[in-house]
Image: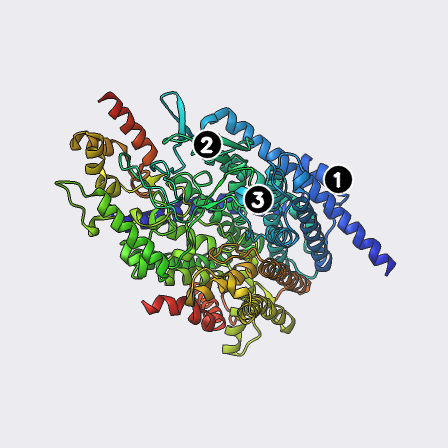
Amino acid sequence: MNNSFVNTARLLGAGLRALLVLTLVTGVLYPLAVTGVAQALFTGRANGSEVEADGRVVGSSLIGQRYDLPPKKGGRAPAPDLRWFQGRPSNGLGTNSVNTQYTLILSGATNLAADNTVLIRQVEDARAAVVRDNTVPGWTVRPADVPADAVTSSGSGLDPDISPQYARLQVHRVAARNHLPVARVERLVDDHVQGRTLGFIGEPRVDVLALNTALRALTKGH
Amino acid sequence: MGPVLAGVLQLLALIGALGLAHVPLGSYMARVYSSDRHWRVERWVYRSIGADPDTQMRWPAYLRGVLAFSTVSVLLLYLLQRIQGVLPLSMGFRSIDPAQAFNTAASFVTNTNWQSYYGEQTMGHVVQTAGLAVQNFVSAAVGIAVAVALVRGFARSRTGDLGNFWTDLVRGTVRILVPLAAVAAVVLVACGAIQNFSGIHEVGQFMGGSQQWNGGAVASQEAIKEIGTNGGGYFNANSAHPFENPSPFTNLFEIFLILVIPFSLTRTFGLMVGSVRQGYAILATMAAIWVGFTALMMWTEFAHHEGALQIAGGSMEGKEVRFGVGGSSIFAVATTLTSTGAVDSFHSSFTGLGGGIALLSMMLGEIAPGGTGSGLYGILIMAIIAVFIAGLMVGRTPEYLGKKIGSREIKLAAVYILVTPALVLVFTAVSMALPTPPHSMLNPGAHGFSEVLYAFTSAANNNGSAFAGLNANTDWFNTMTGLAMLLGRFLPMVFVLALAGSLAGQKPVPTTAGTLRTEKPLFTGLLVGAILIITGLTYFPALALGPLAEGLAS
């Protein structure tokens, strides 16, 4: 009995020492070495791919943002600023609840099932809004023209991209709101379409922040 | 090119890349576990442990090593979370509550990486890198060690010796996982994954004002999270978060990392038992199931004949534009057929049948190709069951790899395959029967039941993915999924090591004309059939109540 207790203690001691040594290798040396290499070779990317425009940081090329009008009184959901290209819905985003000294955005999806009436309503409302917002005199958007990414929330809630179809659908509205020729805005979108990597990996997409940054530069030069 | 063709080409590219890595990595791993030389850094580690790396262990000693190391791991990881509030570099994050700390410790030590917390608002730098990421390495190394011990059981005769646990643990970490992870982490950073210790900081926004972001050692953790089939995300959105998985290429690369060790281990197995063709038969079984499930998943996700997805015109809820339906489907099957559980899209919003395929993938026992190590020992157990069934059909004592499958062996294999379904079904049934646990469900109806079934399937099989609408941060789910993870990891290991010891003690049986040729396609077919039928019969009633009811209703 006593002997087996001693043996167990000795074994646990060996386990503890093994864990501590392997923690040093995999939990201290490994992350520090990778950080060193990353910071030396890929400084911008290792720090979040921040994008600057007009001398100030406007976000990250990887993280989606909202392009809304300033919130109105009464706490209603902010309305989209229709001068700018709009990204995907992000109904799965959460707000920081644990450490409230920060206002962190919590990434996430809605996790709603396809047959859930809440999700069905979200999709229908989003599509009605896309049709309404993007129909301008001389250009009618039909519900069937609205692509899936425009009416569904992404996995992270921070999807920086939209499909080229959704970007093109917004061209007439953006041109009208910014008093730009439609052809000019169309060309802007075409310039920002990224195809599949090597022709087959992933899906074609448009980075909304890059597109809006270029649009702002265009309106300023106008 | 349409998205379906692009998805198929991505799958083919993945098969090609895995094929290229198979021989070099599989052979390298065989050398790692067969070599009698020690690296200098390893000698230093053995001295600190106080272990002689050349002592051979019989199965009880090997098991005691596994259990002692894992016990200490759970305790230390629990402690680290409980004192987070006073640790440096914690960015002001508080200590974790006992139930959640237990759940998380059990989760990461068992290679499950189920998360009942939001990464970005809960875990500071020290817990993430020196606690959670460390277990990403060592839990994977423990899994490979146990698999290698079983392979030695087949390869050796008239001895009880299965190798040395400390040697296998240290070599797996130092020679395989760390070098692979270091290279992969740098590739991920080069594509945009972040790697810094900058903490929470303000970043300007396009419309003015600013937002707050976490920094962190994300790429280094992401790399081992996939290579070690772990799956615990730095951020809540896991591999859907652009800082973890920034581009279409990294998505495919991460799927490759998930699959490369489990598939390559079949070559390691073949070399160690002295017949590469035996390894190919196992590989073919795994590959057939993996490709079949991926094709099914793509079919149902591209077809999207259901409710909100049909109205939206595409199965894009919970999916990222850069990955699309194809890339997300391939990821979802790879992560659930291994014990990974990382997600680049949210399974709860897949079609009903798509969610069912993810569930069934885990229910197969995660053996195609399965987790690092656990996949190999899982499928070898199924191979024993398959030769037993074949033996019954012809009335011969079954043999596998020159070893008799007698009553002791078949009992151990049978208990192994009963443990996980028992845990899944009992925990799910109790949770549904009690008054409060069902309050955690987000979705109504059949999908709500699927959330609970998915949670315990994921926990007991050490996967870690979720139908994440379920509020799992309750005392009930934290405690019960924690127990399911521990029992689902270590009980099967007991049976595997006991089996290994029993096989190693036998004398080899000569191959005769009556021996079932387990390296032939006929056996692969038998094995695929045994896997699907045994799992199908075990779980069909539960699946019928959840995903089948949902998927067939529309």
Q: Are marks 3 and 2 in contact (CB under 8 Å)?
A: no
The residue depicted at 34 percent of the width and 69 percent of the height is B552
Q: In the shown orientation, is residue A137 left or right of residue B412?
A: left
Helix, strand or loop at disc 3? helix
Type of the residue with mark 1: Ser
Which residue is tagged 2? Answer: A48
Q: Is residue B338 left or right of residue A21?
A: left
- How far, Cα to Cα, is label 3 from label 2? 20 Å
Residue B269, relative to residue B404: is it above or below? above
Q: Amino acid at mark 3?
A: Thr
Check if mark 3 and mark 1 are on a common chain.
Answer: yes
The alpha-carbon separation of the residues under discs 3 and 1 comes to 33 Å
Residue B299 picture quarter: bottom left
Observer able to see residue A177? yes
Three-letter amino acid code at the position of disc 2: Gly
Mark 2–mark 1 distance (CA, rounded to whole Å): 39 Å
Q: Give the letter of the chain under mark 2.
A: A
Q: Residues within 10 Å of mark 3 (few under 14, many from 20)?
A: many
Q: Give the x, y percent position of residue A93.
A: 43, 46
- Give the colouring mode of the picture: rainbow
Q: Give the mark toward the camera: 2 or 1.
A: 2
- Where on the picture, by quarter, is residue B274? bottom right
Disc nearer the start of the sequence (3/1): 1
Q: Which mark is residue B48?
A: 1
SS at mark 1 in the image: helix
Q: Position of residue B401 (x, y in %)?
A: 56, 63
Question: Pointer 3: what residue?
Answer: B122
Of badges 3 and 2, nearer the viewer stands: 3
